[in-house]
């Protein structure tokens, strides 16, 4: 299944992300379980975590050093809030 395009991503407290999709869904994804190890551990720095951005065309999200999460994981493992 193709996931809808992400229109915006906003970092929240407690290492969560608010994702707004083209379907008008707002979903919250918890990044905290991923913040460990050499690759994702850098996300534990709150300033760096807040630098999250959309990838081209709203297909996903990423951070400047290359960390990203699969679009299907973002959608399927997030919680619908409205």
Image (cartoon, helix red, strand yellow):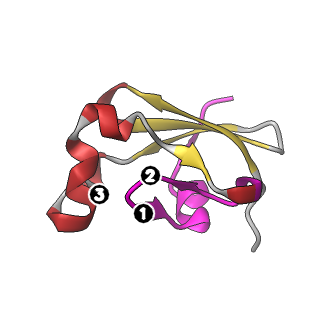
Badge 2 marks a residue whose secondary structure is loop
**33 or 40, nearer to the observer:** 40
Q: Name the residue carrying label 1.
A: 66
User: What stretch of residues is rendered in magenta?
Assistant: 57-82
Q: Real-space Cα distance between discs 3 and 1?
A: 14 Å
Residue drawn at (69%, 29%), measured in percent from left and top? 82
Residue drawn at (36%, 48%), measured in percent from left and top? 31
Sort mark 1 into few (<14), some (14-19) or many (20+) by Cα contacts within 10 Å.
few
Q: Locate residue 48, reporting x and y percent.
A: 32, 39
- The mark nearer the N terminus, 2 or 3, is 3
In this picture, is 9 found above or below 33?
above
Badge 3 marks a residue whose secondary structure is helix
Q: Locate residue 20, reporting x and y percent.
A: 69, 37
Residue 65 belongs to the span the image colors magenta = yes
**47 or 69, nearer to the observer:** 47
Q: Looking at this view, name the residue that lies furthest to the top.
A: 13
Are the residues flagged by discs 2 and 3 in contact, CB closer than 8 Å? no
Badge 1 marks a residue whose secondary structure is loop
Q: Locate residue 39, reporting x and y percent.
A: 25, 66
Which labelled disc corresponds to residue 34?
3
Position of residue 52 in the picture relative to residue 24 (left or right): left
User: Which marked residue is nearer to the observer: mark 2 or mark 3?
Assistant: 2
Q: Name the residue carrying label 2.
A: 63
In this picture, is 15 found above or below 4?
above
Tell me the quadrant of the picture where the N terminus can be found.
bottom right
Residue 60 belongs to the span the image colors magenta = yes
Q: Real-space Cα distance between discs 2 and 3?
A: 14 Å
Position of residue 23 in the picture relative to residue 69 (left or right): right
Position of residue 11 in the picture relative to residue 72 (left or right): left
């Amino acid at each position: 299944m193709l996931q809808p395009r992400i229109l915006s991503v906003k970092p929240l407290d407690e290492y969560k992300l608010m994702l707004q999709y083209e379907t008008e869904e707002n979903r919250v994804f918890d990044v905290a379980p991923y913040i460990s190890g050499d690759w994702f551990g850098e996300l534990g720095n709150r300033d760096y975590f807040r630098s999250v951005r959309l990838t081209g065309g709203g297909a996903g999200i990423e951070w400047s050093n290359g960390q990203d999460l699969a679009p299907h994981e973002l959608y399927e493992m997030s919680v619908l809030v409205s």
